[in-house]
Amino acid sequence: MHQKILIMDFEGRHGQEIAKIIRGFQVYCEIERSSPDNLAIEDENTAGLVIVGSAEGSSLEDELDSLLSKADVPVLGICFDGGFNNKKAGKETAATPGLNSLKLNHPENSILFEDAEKEFEVISSCDGIFADLSHGFKATSQGDNGESLSLEKDIFYLLGFYPELSGENGKKIIENYLFKLCGCTGDWSIDDYIEKQVSEIRKTVGEGGALCALSGGVDSSVCAALAYRAVGSKLKCIFVDTGLMRKNEGDEVEEVFGKILGGSFFRIDAQDRFLGKLNGVTDPEKKRKIIGEEFIRIFEEESGKFEGIEYLIQGTIYPDIIESGVGGSVVKSHHNVGGLPENIDFKGIIEPLNMLFKTEVRELGRKLGLPDKLLNRQPFPGPGLGVRVIGGITKEKLEILREADAIFREELSEIGLDKELNQYFVVLTDIKSVGVRDGKRTYAYTAALRAVKTDDFMTAKWAKLPHDLLQKVSKRITDEVSGINRVVYDITDKPPGTIEWE
Ligand code: XMP
């Protein structure tokens, strides 16, 4: 078993960023969101505990107190100081809203700061740490106004700033913590992960069979390839061609997976079924529901054709799990291909990627020989072009959209911008307007181009695409795609817009 760093995260995003840095040092880590009482720090493989908190963490004071009294591995506390330490020291929480930039210097010798610059910028969400030093903590760094920005005592290392937002110096702090304080050896790798998952899938599936829903997206593709490596032809992968795919997409998926999965790949042509169900439906939520339900129905029907299937294998990845633990209102009902069909009685569900971040999933896919073109794909929503054709969906409108979308993607990749954008596509609006071509009046659809930059897809900024590119795309679309005579560019951030239009 590999050493593990446990990250207890009260804040949301920061824990994931820290986890990515830790894994970058080839040290395995997990994020825990449950109550501090349930923490498995007794696990003999746990080499360290990172607590990421906030000033509001003060309500957890008692639990944290008892947790820390149980800890026997080095504890790195990140920004839970404001609440925890101050309360402990009988002082008021000294949190300031938002993030401040401060200059830190660390004259004291602390292992945590070894090889970091003597002075560097940090980002803090509190006014530094004001813990009562008589509790035995010593300050190891100061900010601009002499406030303590880090404290140490025994195996406790508390930071009043976010190391993951402090560039190379922040990384150095994490590296020191892992290797010099926790004694990590940095020997975890994706190869180990593959080996472990392959043997676990094999053991679980045994003599039975397993089913996998393949959408052609990165996660389900990597999952299918991994499961195939484990159980070979005992795996059956179903790719439902909904007719809501981009240009040539169905054929591309078949070409790649027909080779990789051989006789385990099944492409189900369900275009007419989806179009039939969607006929005349214009409400976005209804469309999403119909597509999701139809997908599951087809999946159930098809899987019923195989004998001995006991397990469902799906490509849930780590952020899906972490994020589903955070409450929030549903803006759109997301349909995930590979979601559990309720009426199929499986003995169990296997999620072999559920401890990996997206970059790690891609790395794993590369090791399994999946092509880069597939692994670097931008995200594509489960309901596909169904939510990019605004209003009623017809075969003709889908065809028009596919052509326009292919042109936009082609032109972006021609100048290398596809690598800088996180998502880009064309929406076929339901607006028709008057135009003129070859001296004749036209009355055709308006296409909207959408291109965004985002880290997490929860918020996004519209991309400032070069005017020359927009001009070229507009000309090509209106020249080459009959059915579109007007092109607009969507300049809406998320929020207030969403990335997709429906
Ligand atoms: P929105 O439009 O909500 O989209 O800003 C955020 C991200 O999620 C993708 N998306 C989906 N992905 N099933 C998915 O798997 C869905 O139903 C779905 N709807 C939106 C969207 O493309 C963007 O990347």
Image: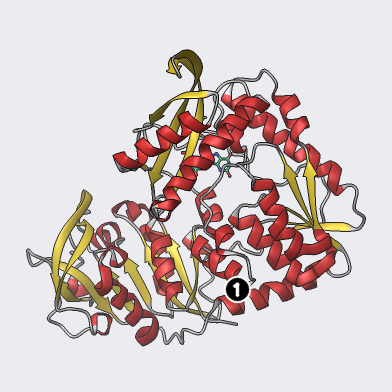
Identified at 75% across, 25% down, the residue is: 276
x, y (%) of residue 221? 65, 58
Q: Is residue 345 left or right of residue 230?
A: right
Identified at 76% across, 59% down, the residue is: 258
Furthest residue in direction front, as rendered: 438
Q: Which is more toward the observer, 154 or 297?
A: 297
Identified at 54% across, 69% down, the residue is: 363
Q: Which is more toward the observer, 323 or 214?
A: 214
Q: Is residue 447 above or below residue 187?
A: above
Q: Is residue 449 above or below residue 53?
A: above
x, y (%) of residue 212? 75, 55
Tell me the kind of residue under disc 1.
Lys
What kind of colouring is applied to the model shown?
secondary structure
Residue 141: tell me if it is visible. yes
Under circle 1, the secondary element is helix
x, y (%) of residue 107? 12, 81
Point out the image quarter for the N terminus. bottom right
Residue 333: tell me if it is visible. no
Q: Is residue 107 left or right of residue 348?
A: left
Q: Is residue 192 above or below residue 464?
A: below
Cβ(mark 1) to ligand 1 < 8 Å? no
Q: Quadrant of residue 52?
A: bottom left
Q: Quadrant of residue 256?
A: bottom right
Identified at 84% across, 58% down, the residue is: 310
In the picture of the structure, the residue carrying the numbered disc 1 is 367
Q: Quadrant of residue 62?
A: bottom left
Q: Is residue 267 left or right of residue 225?
A: right
Q: Which is more toward the observer, 92 or 276?
A: 276
Dot 1 alpha-carbon crowd within 10 angstroms: few under 14, some 14 to 19, many 20 or more: some
x, y (%) of residue 279? 70, 21
